[in-house]
Amino acid sequence: MKIELIDTGFFYADGGAMFGAIPKQAWRRRYPEKGDNCCVLVARSALVTTDCGRIILIDTGAGHRHARLLESYRFFNQLDLSDALQERGISCEEVTDVVLTHLHFDHCGYATVSGKDKQLQPAFPNALHWVSQRQWDNFLHPHPLEKDSYFQEDMQTIAEKGLLCLLQQDTRLCPTVTLRLFDGHTPGQIVPYFTFPLQTVVFAGDVIPLTAHLSPEWISAYDTSPLLSYNEKIRLLEEVVAENMLLIYCHDAYTPYSEVKKTGTFFKKKMPGNDLSAFGFTRT
């Protein structure tokens, strides 16, 4: 199995929104401020090729169609995901599975693209698109606090083409890939686990988007259920520490992954102890 991280684009987010009740004097010591109270984040995807022949894409980035939000969040250095895959010798048609951690636009915007006839079509026409049932229900009937992050057109074509697979519970996608469900930021987020002989790698998504969020009480104002976010972060972090897992951060522009250590009641990042070539890790 091989994991390749693809940074699909960078954007600015308000520090107060990213860190909620945490004072600026505290969060700026853990994550750089880039002026106007803003932080630079990344929309990170992962390309996973397995020994059983599956080509799995975790999240697709924001895409290029949502001009208002792309401008509002000042996206820059965006990649075309199709081109990024072609550089790796993979066509969009060869992708077998697209795992969408959740359906906010910055995680699924490239799931559909405009065709030659200007009609929307699946960017990965032969792939099964994995979404949790709870997230899908929330996507169709969103709470007012997060409705501006959802766009029906991102997923409507996927569903119409019969490419949507809804998860009811934790599911093993193949012998080395497990999809597990976590709540808090939004209902039914998918957290993929990749089992290697030496170590398990976890794509944490927005359960733990930045290394600064390793502190369980550091909860984004974007999280719709902050008390639940706290409990779910603890659940994930305790397992990561106990099993010495490697954590991938989907929005951290400076630290793409790390191991985690626990000192007393505090969780902190530590650098991986294993040679990452064992995982086939690369980063663009």
Image: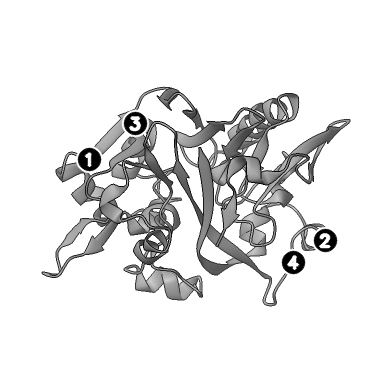
Mark in front: 2 vs 1 = 1
Quick one: quadrant of the C terminus?
bottom right
Q: Residue at x 22, y 49 (%)?
A: 125
Task: Kindly identify the residue that appears in the image at 52 percent across and 43 percent down.
Answer: 2
Image-quadrant location for residue 19: bottom right
Task: Answer with mark 2 or mark 1, whichever residue precedes in sequence.
Answer: 2
Left/right placement of residue 263 relative to residue 165 reads right
Q: Are marks 4 and 3 in contact (CB under 8 Å)?
A: no
Q: Residue at x 17, y 39 (%)?
A: 162
Tell which circle, 1 or 3, labels the residue nearer the N-terminal end. 3
x then y, percent, for residue 177: 47, 30
What label does residue 163 carry, if any? 1
Query: Residue tagged by mark 4?
Result: 32
Q: Mark 4 to mark 2: distance in Å?
A: 7 Å
Q: Earlier in the sequence, mark 4 or mark 3?
A: 4
**Amino acid at dot 1:** Leu
Label 1 to label 3: alpha-carbon separation: 14 Å
Amino acid at the residue labelled 4: Pro
Q: Find residue 133 and name its label.
A: 3
Apparent side of residue 56 relative to residue 166 in the rendered image (left or right): right
Alpha-carbon neighbours of circle 1 within 10 Å: few (<14), some, or many (≥20)?
many
The local secondary structure at tag 1 comes to loop
| Element type at mark 2 | loop
Residue 29 disc label: 2
Within 10 Å of disc 4 (Cα), the crowding (few <14, some 14-19, many 20+) is: some
| Residue 106 image offset from top left, x and y in percent | 44, 58
Mark 4–mark 2 CB contact (< 8 Å):
no
